[in-house]
Amino acid sequence: MNGAWRSGLWLSALAAALMMIHGCGTLPDQGLAREAMERGDYETARKNYAALAEDGYADAQAGMGDLTASAGDPASLKEAEVLYRQAAPESVKAQSRLGRLLLRQSPGDPQKVQESRQLLEGALDKGEFSAVVPLTLLYLGYPRMAPVVDPQQKVDSWRAQGIAEADLAQILIYRNQGTYNAHLPQIEQLCRARLAVLDACYVELATINRMRAQPKAQADLLVQLRQGLREGRVAPLRVESVARVLSSPALEGPPDPQSAQRLLEELAPVYPPAWTSLARLIDDYPAQGDAPQLLSALQRGREAGDPRAELLTGRLYYLGKWLPQDPRLAEEHLLKAAAAGEVGAHYYLGQLYRRGYLGQVEPQKALLHLLLAARNGSPNADLALAHMFSDSRGVKVNRINAFVFAQLAQRQGTVDAGPVLSALQSGMTPAERKIAQPLLEEEAQARLTGATLARLQTPENGQDLL
């Protein structure tokens, strides 16, 4: 009895000592931190991760890196890089996260991309399968970086090993090849088999159900989705992505904004970024709400620190839609969005400066922002650049540059590029055409990687990987 009593006393003293180390209340818990971050409760996540990171837990340092990187602005991404680098020697998770972050931060820096590849391949060799999808993106986006690597052979090998994430990598290859629609049966089969372990598959199945106009299958999937969310098997981010698949006007098949709205309204109170998607849905489908509802959701999105809310607010001020047209307020919100990594903001900023909406034409600023937008996959930015170099508003007419950007816009299916291109071609000399052609191919190659990564990672495809 005495021994048992002493043992119990010792355990009680140890528990008390541990409580004193981290203050009164529950001990910090990494699992709680992960769950809190997934549901958008960043304060709880930060408290748990920070306490463990201070005690030297490498995976907690990696978790703090994830939390910091989620802000999206350049300063936060730099801070996250420092945290990942501190943890990387002991945490294979941090190695994978660092590789992914470098690819996101510096897509045009060959040295950083090479370091990213080494980190991701090293993490994968140690069994960190979260590296599979970003590594596939790297192989697809930078074929010259690894000329001896066949992405399809790599993915086949990973799938043969039973690595679940390799099935998502296979879907990325289909998207990159433009054969997604041709492989719908295969995608459906592999996603149904992996639904319990890969919540991104809910997004793919929702996409397939929409493309095939299968409302019964879609309704059944949403029942499973809600159940998975309640049980903690499906991340709120995936639920939001499914809602965006249901409502996006850009996707093939009949939209279902009503079901999307119900999902977002259920999700937003526990996952604040969903407020932004709800505002976007009402903007796309005005019958689903009124101005007070949209502006309230948008305000909540901004309060949650979602840069997408800043982008949408800036866009609405730019267009004078739902809000009074106000170029100054548009610029303010768009600059915040751009600083946080929302590349879509650069198109509207470029147009503000190109058209002189702020009082005068600012060609250098316009060129900077429109190029950033164009090189991240915006054909409208290419068309704006073509106009910029052909209409002489603050810029000397340069038919060669205008021709290059008009060609790039037309290659991406921009109908309005045709008349611009015809007018330019009729006035170009043979010497100008000879100069323009290699410039066109050089610019097309320079933006190939950025456009590929942007196309593969739209939120609607559920990846949200980099």
Image: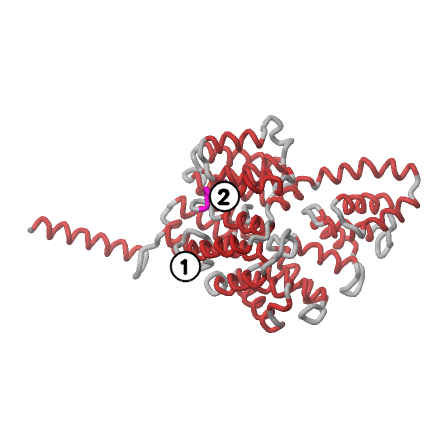
In the depicted structure, whether residue 406 falls above or below residue 294: above
Amino acid type at image mark 1: Thr
Most foreground residue, 121 or 85: 121
Furthest residue in direction top, as rendered: 148
Mark before the other along the chain sequence, 1 or 2: 1
Task: Please give the residue where the numbered disc 2 appears in the rendered image.
Answer: 191
Residue 99 shows in this picture: no
Position of 287 relative to 193 (above/below): below
- The answer to whether residue 115 is visible is yes
Q: Is residue 91 above or below residue 393?
A: above
Which residue is located at x 58 percent, y 51 percent? 460
Q: Picture coordinates of residue 168 (x, y %)?
A: 52, 41
288 with respect to 164 (left or right): right
Judge from the rendering whether residue 392 lies leftward or rightward of residue 210; answer left or right.
right
Tag 1 residue: 44
Which region is colored magenta?
A: 190-195
Q: Position of residue 411 (x, y in %)?
A: 76, 43
Q: Is residue 225 rendered to the left or right of residue 280?
A: left
Residue type for callout 2: Cys
Estimate the x, y position of residue 112 in percent, counting from the top left: 59, 38
Residue for point 59% across, 53% down: 213
Residue placed at 45% from the left, 54% from the top? 224
